[in-house]
Image (cartoon, grey):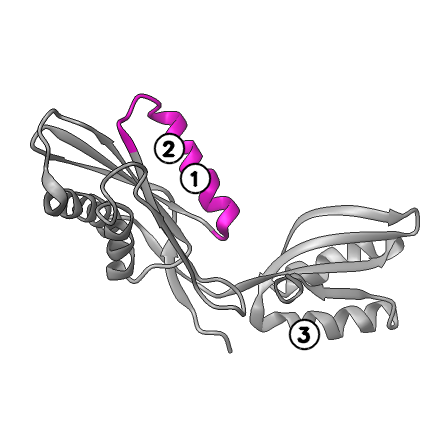
């Protein structure tokens, strides 16, 4: 059975001040890098006049393992992004992106002061954020006869999956792009082959990359 991990239940925000500089930390749930990037852009759009938008994210990832990224966004190298990432690791969270928005207050903090402020802001947002237990998920492409579309969606939901999008290969077949628990993929494969009498196409997209 795939090990569970802890993630955010919903977005949470906190603010600290250091020598008149404002550090607004926004912690956002993100299931993959696309959602993490979307969260970063959302914060940038909300505070377009800010001096910096520094960020880090930590994702549980698929079979390839965890994914971590961070960015200093114009602050001195190593002072912002890595400090935010340290706060995420310290909180023991995955599938989360934290953006710390800074409004410069006119007094330089120095590299040490910047690192402490970014880490403290991120830690504050994560400390008070609601969390929940989750399980690792992966992406699966499922192709079945169009006549079995409804029954296939029911099977996906029964195994804890979610249909993210769909398309049609031809008038007789549909393709579903599914996110689901890693531990349930083998069972879904068996059930779909039984439902379609061997006519299901199932591809683990994380392995195909």
Q: Is residue 63 above or below residue 73?
A: below
Image quadrant assignment for residue 27: top left
Residue 89: image location, x then y, percent: 28, 60
Q: In the rendered structure, find residue 43 and report the number of the disc placed on it.
A: 2
Report if residue 48 lies within the magenta region. Answer: yes
Query: Residue sitting at 14 percent across and 48 percent down?
Result: 116
Is residue 92 left or right of 203 when viewed as pictured? left
Image quadrant assignment for residue 161: bottom right
Residue 57: image location, x then y, percent: 38, 51
The one nearer the camera, 108 or 168, is: 108
Q: CA distance from mark 2 to mark 3?
A: 39 Å
Q: Which residue is mark 1?
A: 39
Judged by its main secondary structure, the magenta piece is helix
Query: Residue sitting at 42 percent across and 32 percent down?
Result: 42
Q: Where the C terminus falls, by quadrant?
A: bottom right
Magenta residues span: 31-52
Q: In the rendered structure, find residue 142 and report the number of the disc placed on it.
A: none
Name the secondary structure under disc 3. Answer: helix
Q: Is residue 168 above or below residue 187?
A: above
């Amino acid at each position: 059975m795939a090990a569970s991990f802890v993630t955010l239940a919903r977005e949470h925000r906190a603010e600290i001040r250091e020598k008149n500089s404002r550090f607004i930390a926004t912690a956002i749930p993100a299931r993959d890098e696309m959602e993490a990037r979307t969260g970063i852009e959302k914060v940038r759009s909300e505070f377009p006049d800010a001096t910096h938008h520094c960020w880090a994210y930590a994702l549980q990832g698929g079979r390839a393992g965890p994914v971590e990224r961070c960015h200093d966004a114009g602050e001195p190298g190593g002072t912002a992004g890595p400090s935010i990432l340290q706060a995420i690791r310290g909180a023991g969270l995955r599938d989360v992106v934290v953006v710390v928005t800074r409004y410069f207050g006119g007094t330089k903090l120095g590299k040490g002061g910047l690192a402490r402020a970014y880490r403290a802001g991120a830690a504050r947002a994560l400390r008070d954020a609601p969390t929940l237990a989750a399980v690792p998920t992966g992406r699966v492409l499922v192709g079945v006869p169009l006549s079995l579309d409804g029954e296939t969606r029911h099977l996906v939901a029964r195994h804890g999956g979610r249909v993210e999008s769909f398309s049609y290969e031809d008038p007789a077949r549909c393709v579903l792009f599914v996110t689901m628990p890693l531990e349930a993929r083998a069972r879904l494969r068996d059930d779909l082959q039984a439902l379609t009498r061997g006519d299901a196409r199932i591809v683990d997209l994380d392995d195909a990359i």
